[in-house]
């Protein structure tokens, strides 16, 4: 997938593009300021293989089948898919993780070691479920 195809897809009003494969024309794609997620870059043009398509219903991303009622969240670390009905739960879980990590970073910035920070965090978050090893 290169810049010409990206411009065409962008003109459809898509919020971004997720490709289970490689892209090319990286610099041109970056100038588009349009989010594109792929497995990496390649200098090789795509091949012209004939494949049967179920346009608008489902797509394969590796072992995963992504349906039209799935939701995608993407950032520079990757792509996560989940059912739209789980959006509230996923957002709440992500917010809780971000809050816990922010507290952890503040603790580290004050000079507490990661080991001591994790022991305190794990003890308060999971009291009774995680038992520290005796050493």
Image (cartoon, grey):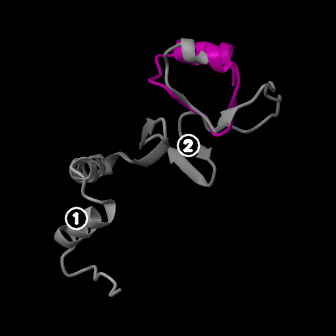
Tell me the CA gap for discs 1 and 2.
41 Å
Residue 35 placed where, x, y %?
Answer: 49, 25
Q: Secondary structure at mark 1?
A: helix
Please say if 36 is above or below 86: above
Picture residue at 47% right of the left edge, 22% below the top: 14
Q: Quadrant of the N terminus?
A: top right
Q: Which residue is situated farthest in the front direction here?
A: 111
Picture residue at 25% right of the left edge, 62% below the top: 117
- The image quarter containing residue 41 is top right
Q: Nearer the viewer, mark 1 or mark 2?
A: 1
Q: Earlier in the sequence, mark 1 or mark 2?
A: 2
Residue 3 placed where, x, y %?
Answer: 66, 15
- The image quarter containing residue 8 is top right
Circle 2 packing at 10 Å, graded few (<14), some (14-19), many (20+), is some
**Does residue 21 appear to the left or right of 116 in the view shown?**
right
Residue 26 - label:
none
Of residues 18 and 39, the one nearer the viewer is 39
Picture residue at 50% right of the left edge, 44% below the top: 67
Residue on which the image places disc 2: 58
Q: Secondary structure at mark 2?
A: strand
Residue 114 placed where, x, y %?
Answer: 32, 60
Please say if 121 is above or below 100: below
Magenta segment: 1-28
**Does residue 109 appear to the left or right of 49 in the view shown?**
left
Of residues 110 and 88, the one nearer the viewer is 110
Q: Is residue 24 magenta?
A: yes
Residue 107 placed where, x, y %?
Answer: 21, 53
Residue on which the image places disc 1: 121
Please say if 85 is above or below 52: below
Of residues 132 and 130, the one nearer the viewer is 132
């Amino acid at each position: 997938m290169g810049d010409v195809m990206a411009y065409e897809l962008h003109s459809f009003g898509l919020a971004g593009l997720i490709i289970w494969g490689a892209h090319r024309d990286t610099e041109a794609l970056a100038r588009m300021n349009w989010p594109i997620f792929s497995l990496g870059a390649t200098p090789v043009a795509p091949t012209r293989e004939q494949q049967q398509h179920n346009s608008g219903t489902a797509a394969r991303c590796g072992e995963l089948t992504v349906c039209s009622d799935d939701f995608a969240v993407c950032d520079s670390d990757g792509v996560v898919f989940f059912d739209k009905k789980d959006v509230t739960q996923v957002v709440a879980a992500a917010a809780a993780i971000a809050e816990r990590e922010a507290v952890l970073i503040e603790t580290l910035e004050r000079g507490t070691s990661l080991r001591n920070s994790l022991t305190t965090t794990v003890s308060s978050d999971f009291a009774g479920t995680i038992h520290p090893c005796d050493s």
